[in-house]
Image (cartoon, rainbow, N blue to C red):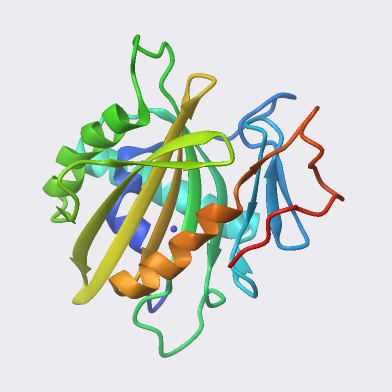
């Protein structure tokens, strides 16, 4: 979210969340990976993750969910309804000799009913005290707006030391359908993080009327 290495989000973000399984038709976890692109039909977006990255299978994701519950209970953070949508890392799980395995996660948290005028910036500001409690330090004065393909995100960046390893994390969030959808990028330094975060530029809407969906080529290609 490892054996010799820990996915940074495990130690810096997932304590906020308690992931849930699902058994419904229309559901936040209705997504699939096709030809290097993650499609989510519930939230109607397509995201091209970095080429040759290892997408985690359901067994790994289930371990992440279990760890999330344990961290939430241990930290005393109120449990929330949240879903792990997608995870991928630069190197396959268990690759030896790696102190830090750069990782991308996409998470959705149910925040309904959404307060009037509530934005992704509000959400990220609520996350900050929890991050600070865990020893992470914000790198921005406040979350900054980021727009792509009609989506309005806010971004917040952090630095932290996890088991002696320096990490950087960027979290992009937008609010839709009563959910806060968060894209988290975690890497070893700011340069690496910014390169990873360029994947946000590949984001596109999908679904009826968009002309984009599984089996169709994304019009915008990653840098």
In the image, is 4 to the left or to the right of 141?
A: right
Q: Quadrant of residue 60?
A: bottom right
The residue positioned 28% from the left and 65% from the top of the image is: 168
Which of these two is toward me, 187 or 197? 197
Residue 6 makes an appearance in the image: no
Q: Position of residue 216 (x, y in %)?
A: 85, 50
Residue nearest the observer in this picture, 110 or 222:
222
Residue 110: x and y in percent read: 45, 24
What residue is drawn where x is 41% and y is 59%?
Answer: 185
The image position of residue 87, as x and y in percent, is 54, 56
Please tell me how many numbered marks the rendered image carries. 0
Judge left or right: residue 213 versus residue 112.
right
Q: Residue at x 68, y 28 (%)?
A: 23
In the depicted view, which residue is nearer to us: 149 or 99? Answer: 149
The percent coordinates of residue 80 (x first, y second) are: 38, 28
- Taking the image as drawn, is residue 203 in sight? yes
The quarter in which the C terminus is drawn is: bottom right
Left or right of residue 47: residue 109: left
Task: Please tell me whether residue 54 is drawn above or below residue 154 in the rendered image.
Answer: below
User: Seen from this angle, which residue lies furthest right?
Assistant: 215
> The N terminus lies in which quarter of the figure?
bottom left
């Amino acid at each position: 979210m490892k054996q010799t290495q820990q996915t940074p989000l495990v130690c810096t973000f997932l304590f906020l969340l308690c992931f849930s399984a699902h058994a419904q038709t229309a559901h936040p976890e209705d997504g699939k990976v096709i030809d290097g692109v993650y499609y989510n039909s519930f939230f109607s977006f397509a995201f091209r993750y970095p080429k040759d990255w290892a997408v985690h299978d359901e067994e790994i994701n289930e371990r992440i969910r279990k760890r999330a519950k344990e961290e939430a209970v241990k930290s005393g953070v109120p449990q929330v309804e949240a879903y792990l949508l997608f995870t991928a890392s630069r190197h396959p799980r268990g690759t030896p000799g790696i102190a830090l395995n750069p990782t991308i996660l996409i998470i959705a948290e149910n925040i309904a009913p959404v307060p009037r005028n509530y934005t992704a910036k509000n959400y990220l500001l609520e996350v900050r005290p929890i991050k600070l409690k865990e020893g992470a330090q914000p790198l921005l004065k406040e979350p900054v707006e980021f727009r792509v393909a009609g989506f309005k995100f806010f971004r917040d960046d952090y630095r932290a030391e996890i088991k002696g390893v320096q990490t950087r994390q960027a979290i992009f969030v937008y609010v839709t359908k009563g959910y806060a959808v968060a894209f988290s990028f975690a890497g070893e330094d700011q340069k690496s993080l910014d390169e990873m975060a360029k994947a946000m530029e590949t984001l596109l809407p999908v679904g009826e009327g968009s002309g984009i969906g599984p089996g169709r080529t994304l019009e915008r290609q990653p840098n």
